[in-house]
Image (cartoon, helix red, strand yellow):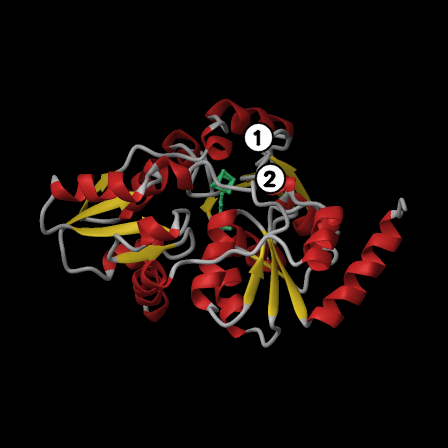
Amino acid sequence: MKMNKEEIVEKILELKQKRNAVILAHNYQLGEIQDIADYIGDSLGLSQKAAQVEAKVIVFCGVHFMAETAAILAPDKTVLIPDKNAGCPMAEMITAEEMREWKKNYPGRKVVCYVNTTAEVKAECDICCTSSNASRVVESLEEEEILFAPDKNLASFISRTSKKRIIPWDGYCYVHNNIHANHITLKKNLHPDAEVWVHPECRPEVIDLADKVFSTGQMIKEARITEKNEIIIGTEAGIIYRLQKENPSKKFYSAKDLALCSNMKKINLKKVLRSLEQMVHRVEVPAEIREKALGSIQRMINI
Ligand code: 13P
Ligand code: SF4
């Protein structure tokens, strides 16, 4: 039977209660998903939420590494991802084997891994970080030389304020790396009074043009308190939906209209419904990997 959007939403809400489930959604999710989510946030906020919620089931609307982090932090809960192919290409740019080989070339160095990595890679690292705490995590280490994987742009952003030598892995996010300086200048010409906020996964020349560099969660917070009425946003365009919805008197322009993460957009209402109906797709992390990866994540949370 074909259901309309309202019927699908109604069914999701009904099943959510029946299963004792919560829906967590990343800031880049489709508007229809943000509208039914119990909590929307950035990578750090979502993983913390996963560890705190009392529900038995977490329907994670985001990409695979985020659901995996939730599964690591909440092993007693059932974590479901509505589309098992919603991966993060950047997270797949380094494997655990590559990480082990890389570390051999730099004996004694501490390894920081961005949360956008697989659980196997996290298990090989000393400490994890997200876009909202990367500099703080690096500065918390005593060592002067740090290996950082996989995002070379985030590594370069940290280097701007750190005296440490950051040795980057050659990874990047295809969405942020495709936002170029000319996209920013073009939008700046169209909206000369607008402030420019960009994500630290952007290229260095884009960071140079920004007024502020924020994680997605920091953008959401700052949008509520800024006195600026117009802001150009240099990150995945899905965040504009939430920014605009929460701040109707302000104007948010995407630095690049087609800055879309196709992986994030794989999740839709129908798939969330199927996820709750069939309890698919379960995200599980083998115990020994989980234990080591949890160490990296926990060391970050403790800072
Ligand atoms: P945030 O932690 O800032 O939400 O970033 C996650 C991400 O995947 C950015 O592309
Ligand atoms: Fe990964 Fe980039 Fe998509 Fe974020 S926007 S999930 S880093 S591919």
Disc 1 crowd, CA 10 A, few/some/many (<14, 14-19, 20+): some
Q: Secondary structure at mark 1?
A: helix
Q: Residue at x 62, y 73 (%)?
A: 55
Which residue is under mark 1? 188
Q: Is mark 2 within 8 Å of ligand 1?
A: no
Q: On the image, which quarter does residue 155 sit in?
A: top left
Q: Residue at x 27, y 37 (%)?
A: 169
Residue 222 horizontal/vertical position (percent) = 55, 56
Give amino acid for label 2.
Ala
Residue 135 horizontal/vertical position (percent) = 31, 53
Give amino acid for label 1.
Lys
Disc 2 crowd, CA 10 A, few/some/many (<14, 14-19, 20+): many
Which residue is under mark 2? 194
Quarter of the rendering occupied by the C terminus: bottom left
Q: On the image, which quarter does residue 220 sit in?
A: bottom right
Q: Residue at x 48, y 26 (%)?
A: 180
